[in-house]
Image (tube, coloured by chain):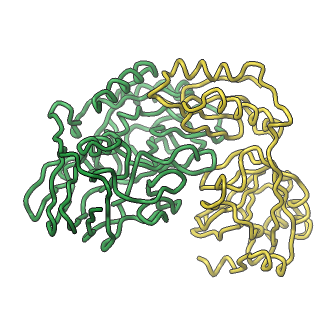
Chain colours: A green, B yellow
Amino acid sequence: MSRLTITASTPLCLLQDGGRFGVRHLGVTQGGAADWCSMSWANWLLGNGLDVPVVEITLGGFAVVAEEDCLLALAGADLGAQIDGEALAPWRSFKLSKGQTLQLTQPLHGARAYLAAPGGFAAPKVLGSSATVVREELGGLDGLGLPLARGATLSYEGQSLGGREMPLELRPDLQSDTPLDLVLGAQIGQFSGQSLFDVFNSAWTVDSRADRMGIRLLGKTLQYQGQPMISEGIPLGAVQVPPDGQPIILLNDRQTIGGYPRLGALTPLALARLAQCLPGKKVRFTPVMQEEGWRKHKNYLKSYL
Amino acid sequence: MSPRIEVAALDCLMLRLFDEIAEANMPWMLAANERLRAVFGEQLIDLVPSYTTLMVHYDLASLSPTQARELIAESLIDLSPNARTRGQCHVLPVWYDLSVGPELGLLAERSGLAVEEVIRRHSAREYQVFALGFAPGFAFMGLVEEVLAAPRLNTPRKKVAAGSVGIAERQTAVYPAVSPGGWNLIGRTPTKLFDRNRDGYSLMQPGDTVRFEAVSHSEFIDLGGDDTPLETLA
């Protein structure tokens, strides 16, 4: 077993995995890494299963000291990672020797970085997953939903199979301005014609009111003209429009059911990209048909093979 | 019933069975729930029933949206509720008291009924569990008598005690854990609604039915209830 001691952390540094499934009908949210693509790459770099537990570091402020020689991997946002003060670029596995400190300082590109260890970090499974959901007191190192705290120990049992570096052409472009793919939902026809035009023809600004439940966008006011809705299941990435007309995109820790009308839902790939956007970033939407989005998704999954 | 299959997300389809909330929906919802689970098998990631809809979250790696739609259509063939698809009935003891249910007085005032009558009427009905949501194990139940219906509080409480029994419009619910909340509180149950160590985790499942049974303070305490007054929690 290899261990790391956490010497700095914030409430936004959480143990995450692929998420908690099969219990949403009980009101239990999905949880899991907000940028599932980068989580998968962090694990891929070590030859792990793609959804084993990783550390999700949002915005930085996290540091660990190696208690033994460790092989680790970092993917996702560039949070100014350093080993003993020397810059470390993401998208690669690396050695952290006994006594060395890995530090993630501040967001340079993107919002969320993922730290992986051989075989995944050790953590109990609660309702089938180690994903930390603070609000529900589920998951994490002790199973009680607490963020990673200074002084805690991360450990892993896996053997390192040797490291990898991600081919340049596969690295996600976190700065990309490509519009986000939006699968149109059932209420799309009940927004005003002007609103439908505005959704796809104007820029939306990521608001500072953003967390793992949802990300608010600011822009033109959207008008829903349909009947009030009865609460129904909310998919990951749902773009809901509350009465103030400003869309909220729902993330991993969203409530399981809700009654605001929806434009539809971002595709998982688009949502992973949105999860890396800092407040102030401008995003655009483009409509995508389910089948077309599905083919893109299947193709992307092949890049992990 | 006029089933419709709607797009919810790349990997989610919404099966809409009804357009209105009604207790009579539930046998059909349960039957559809059972069928969908059987037809999708391992390809089902999650199935979220709520009042009039069932959201099917399927595995994108093994099913295309078109295939998922076909499976839902298949699950609807000759669908009918039967005795096997009935939920469980739970009896929840409740200590109805102003110290743990401060809106008892408000509901009495609104309805023109005595507090004892509000309690009697709330505990007289057998309620349907329409959906679970908001928090793990939080069951939306109904329908309460029209005369007991009341809108949510203008300002939600920052802290509601675990076991608190509330009313919002014509629905009633129990808060499984300490949380913020805007429902009108009328009492508290000692029964634990969500337990990670229990088989199935949640006491209640969609489609179950619930009856509330008024108990005295001493019975409430004997059953393990915590009588800390609400105002001392805030």
Q: What's the residue at 32%, 41% (across, down)?
A: A40
**In-front residue for pair A90/B139:** A90
Q: Position of residue B199 (x, y in %)?
A: 66, 55
Asked if A197 appears above or below A61 in the picture, the reply is: above
Asked if B183 appears above or below B227 in the picture, the reply is: above
Position of A227 compared to B13: left or right? right
**In-front residue for pair A114/B179:** A114
Q: What's the residue at 57%, 28% (across, down)?
A: B13
Is residue A116 visible in the rendered structure shown here? no
Q: What's the residue at 45%, 41% (across, down)?
A: A247
- For residue B161, what is the image quadrant? bottom right
Q: Position of residue A67 (x, y in %)?
A: 22, 68
Q: What's the residue at 29%, 45% (across, down)?
A: A43
**Image quarter hosting the C terminus of chain A:** top left
Q: Please give the count of numbered marks on the rendered protein.
A: 0
- For residue A8, what is the image quadrant? bottom left
Is residue A217 visible in the rendered structure shown here? yes
Q: Position of residue B57 (x, y in %)?
A: 54, 34
